[in-house]
Image (cartoon, coloured by chain):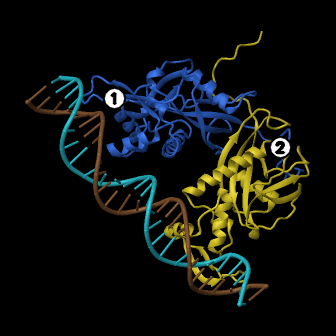
Chain colours: A yellow, B blue, C brown, D cyan
DNA sequence: ACAAAAGTGTTCAACTTACACCCATGG
DNA sequence: CCATGGGTGTAAGTTGAACACTTTTGT
């Protein structure tokens, strides 16, 4: 006779276990477009699908540590700052076994992070955020959507987009980045006013050449 | 010879697994104070410590499902709305084994949810949010702190505090609730203006008796 | 009738939005 | 020299903050 399970949800040695992965939505800004970094893997499930870089947490690491390790391993990117976005726990989200995933987002400058093919990666590429592949592995389309929303919301209060631009950039470049993230047009004068009020930029005095109008180059204050 | 692990973080059948729990920060509003619901368990680790209601996810359920089940089992509360707050993955956060937890927050009216001692619960009680026990189980002190911040931030844009009040309430009661969550004093007239602008309240025409001044009772619009 | 709490408007400052022209540079 | 994009200011509307007295009810 099957023993009726007591309603005791304390963790016991034999509590159910599953694998845990970190999936990282790396955003970049390239060709005046907000991009997201996707890979095709040469091993595992979904080998023919684009997916976010991600991988399984191991015994002695935090998920943040895992995210760092995995991202380095799949892309070579190092010392990237992450933030948690959301947990996905649908029982059938992974074809092989029960796996829950935590999504992170990160911002990088593609110029400083050239793409190289590391082992187990078949393809790696930046995709326009509003033009990602139709069929993606797992629930990564949803994860990207949620991460993009998270980024939009963060843009409003905190100001975390420095990482997406090279050290020196022009104000129109910064404005275009904002417009890309938010998906809307901003007024040039009002945008500049807001940015200057924040008092976070330093005019280097240099002008960017090759562009009509001769825009000044700025960089973020502090270090 | 130990086989060197390839840097392949794909999920495999033998990928590391751990238990996953949901911990729920249930907020209530009682005696004009914002409270959080804590339990002492009669089984498992930390039996002498207050802790958040929570428990382990099982094979065929989502974490949200788990949170619902666990909360019902430990408190009898049903059909509560949750939102994810954060994931905690420190390898040594649980004394028995590797366990990661996802925290949720929920809002209830204590009047509608009388506390009863369910099985495996030794004590259950509402605690003032700014006067929680010194020693708590696991990292629950941190989790409560993060959940409270989450609630504060949510209060600013979305308006999700209806669940903390009885169906009919006075504006001073609502204001006191806001002040409790935010931890600051608000101007009566400005508060009323803001709330009325939102156009979410309906004046029932009734007055609450037993209180000098004879305040009107309001309720949220729609259903 | 007195004490306690509810209810009510206005002013000022700060911020947000809309809007048009001149200047610098590249071709 | 002309086309392209960069840079600048002001006025109107909106929002947020400060502030005191009258009305209602309980005791």
Q: Can I make out residue A221 in this image?
A: no
Residue A196 position (above or below residue B176): below
Instruction: Tell me if I can see residue B38 in this picture.
Output: yes
Q: Is residue B102 left or right of residue B170?
A: right
Q: Quadrant of residue A98?
A: top right
Question: Depth check: A173 or B151 in front?
Answer: A173
- Helix, strand or loop at disc 1? strand
At horizontal 73% and vertical 49% (from top left) the residue drawn is A144
Residue A73 position within the rendered picture, expressed as x and y whole percent measured from the top left: 80, 57
Instruction: Tell which of B3 and A19 is nearer to you.
Output: A19
What residue is at 62 percent from the left and 72 percent from the top?
Answer: A171
Dot 2 falls on which chain?
B
CA–CA distance in space, label 2 to label 1:
59 Å
The numbered dot on residue B11 is 2
Residue A94's image quarter? top right
From what the image shows, is residue A113 above or below residue B19?
below
Q: D8 or A93: nearer the eye?
A: D8
Q: Which mark is residue A202?
A: none
Identified at 69% across, 72% down, the residue is A166
Place of residue A128 in the rendered image (x, y in percent of width and height, measured from the top left) = 78, 58
- Residue B216 circle label: 1
Which circle's residue, 2 or 1, is located before the other in the chain? Answer: 2
Percent position (x, y) of residue A65? 70, 53
């Amino acid at each position: 006779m099957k023993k009726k399970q007591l309603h005791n949800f304390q963790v016991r040695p034999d509590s159910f276990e599953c694998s845990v992965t970190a999936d990282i939505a790396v955003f970049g800004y390239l060709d005046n477009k907000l991009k997201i970094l996707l890979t095709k893997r040469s091993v595992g499930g979904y080998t023919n699908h684009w997916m976010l870089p991600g991988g399984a947490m191991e015994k002695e690491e935090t998920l943040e540590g895992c995210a760092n390790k995995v991202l380095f391993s799949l892309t070579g990117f190092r010392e990237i700052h992450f933030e948690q976005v959301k947990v996905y726990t649908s029982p059938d989200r992974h074809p092989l076994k029960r796996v829950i995933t935590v999504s992170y987002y990160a911002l990088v400058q593609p110029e400083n992070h050239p793409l190289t093919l590391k082992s187990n990666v078949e393809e790696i590429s930046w995709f326009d955020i509003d033009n990602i592949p139709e069929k993606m592995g797992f629930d990564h389309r949803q994860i990207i959507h949620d991460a993009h929303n998270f980024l939009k919301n963060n843009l409003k209060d905190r100001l975390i987009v420095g990482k997406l631009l090279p050290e020196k950039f022009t104000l129109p470049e910064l404005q275009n980045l904002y417009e890309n993230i938010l998906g809307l047009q901003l007024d040039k004068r009002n945008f500049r006013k807001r940015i200057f009020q924040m008092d976070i930029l330093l005019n280097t005095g240099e002008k960017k050449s090759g562009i009509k109008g001769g825009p000044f180059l700025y960089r973020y204050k502090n270090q």
